[in-house]
Image (tube, rainbow, N blue to C red):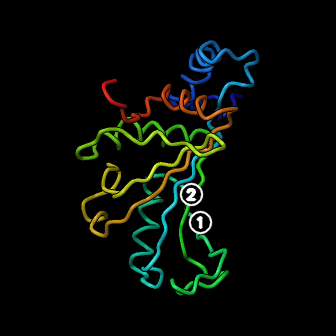
């Protein structure tokens, strides 16, 4: 009897990474061991509810948006600190909503984000090339309407979202090289 997992083909970007990108990155970066090659560990898609924390309709719209674009059920985030100016107390629920993507869903979401959603941004000149100290990358999206999974009615309540790429790498440049292999459209500097 055949295993069910073997019947489902691997996502396109995952297959490209394991078959070609990993070897190319090892040669380009001059790495001795294949385990030193940068690897995408997970992607976290999150939305802060902010001033609309008491509005149930806004919460439902955000929750449905994340569920549709990621294909996974989102989780409520609680406040870690008390902030008097924003009327937030530590442990307060529904300050934000997030989804953590790993494996096949992560690669499928990355493929849709890079090849379908980002080209739909009006006056798009590329994404910022700033990485944090650990080599992770954060991408802020101003409006959810760039995702084709959402209908016009579902984009009436506009909200932004943040996508965090958690990359296992030794250096920021290695992380950037990995995302460039996945065709992440970084903004050009000067006359490049």
In what quadrant of the picture does the C terminus appear?
top left
How far is the residue under mark 2 from the one under mark 1? 6 Å
Residue that protrudes farthest toward the front in the picture: 190
Q: How many marks?
A: 2
146 lies above or below 59: above
Which disc, if any, is residue 75? 1
* Residue beneath disc 2: 99
90 lies above or below 158: below
**Residue 89: x, y in percent?**
62, 85
**Residue 176: x, y in percent?**
54, 32
Residue positioned 31% across, 64% down in the render:
154
**Residue 175: x, y in percent?**
59, 33
Viewer-closest of 6 and 122: 122
Res 20 quadrant in image: top right
**Residue 73: x, y in percent?**
55, 61
Secondary structure at numbered mark 1: strand
Q: Is residue 129 left or right of residue 158?
A: right
In what quadrant of the picture does the N terminus appear?
top right
Secondary structure at numbered mark 2: strand
Res 124 quadrant in image: top left
Residue positioned 48% across, 28% down in the render:
180
Residue that protrudes farthest toward the top in the picture: 27
- Residues at marks 2 and 1 touching, judged by CB atoms closer than 8 Å: yes
Residue positioned 39% across, 79% down in the render:
57
Residue positioned 53% across, 70% down in the render:
96
Viewer-closest of 80 and 18: 80
Q: Residues within 10 Å of mark 2 (few under 14, many from 20)?
A: many
């Amino acid at each position: 009897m055949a295993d069910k997992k073997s019947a489902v083909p691997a996502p396109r970007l995952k297959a490209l990474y394991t078959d070609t990108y990993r070897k190319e990155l090892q040669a380009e970066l001059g790495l001795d061991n294949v385990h030193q090659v940068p690897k995408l560990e997970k992607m976290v898609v999150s939305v802060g509810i902010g001033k609309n924390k008491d509005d149930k309709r806004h919460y439902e719209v955000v929750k449905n948006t994340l569920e549709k674009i990621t294909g996974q059920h989102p989780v409520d985030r609680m406040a870690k600190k008390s902030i008097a100016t924003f009327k937030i107390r530590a442990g307060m629920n529904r300050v934000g909503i997030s989804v953590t993507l790993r494996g096949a869903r992560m690669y499928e979401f990355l493929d849709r984000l890079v090849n379908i959603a980002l080209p739909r941004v009006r006056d798009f000149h590329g994404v910022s090339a700033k990485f944090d100290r650990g080599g992770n990358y954060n991408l802020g999206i101003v409006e959810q309407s760039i995702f084709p999974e959402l209908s016009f009615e579902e984009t009436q309540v506009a909200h932004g979202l943040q996508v965090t790429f958690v990359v296992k790498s030794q250096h920021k440049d290695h992380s950037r090289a990995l995302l460039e292999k996945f065709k992440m459209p970084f903004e050009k500097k000067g006359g490049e």
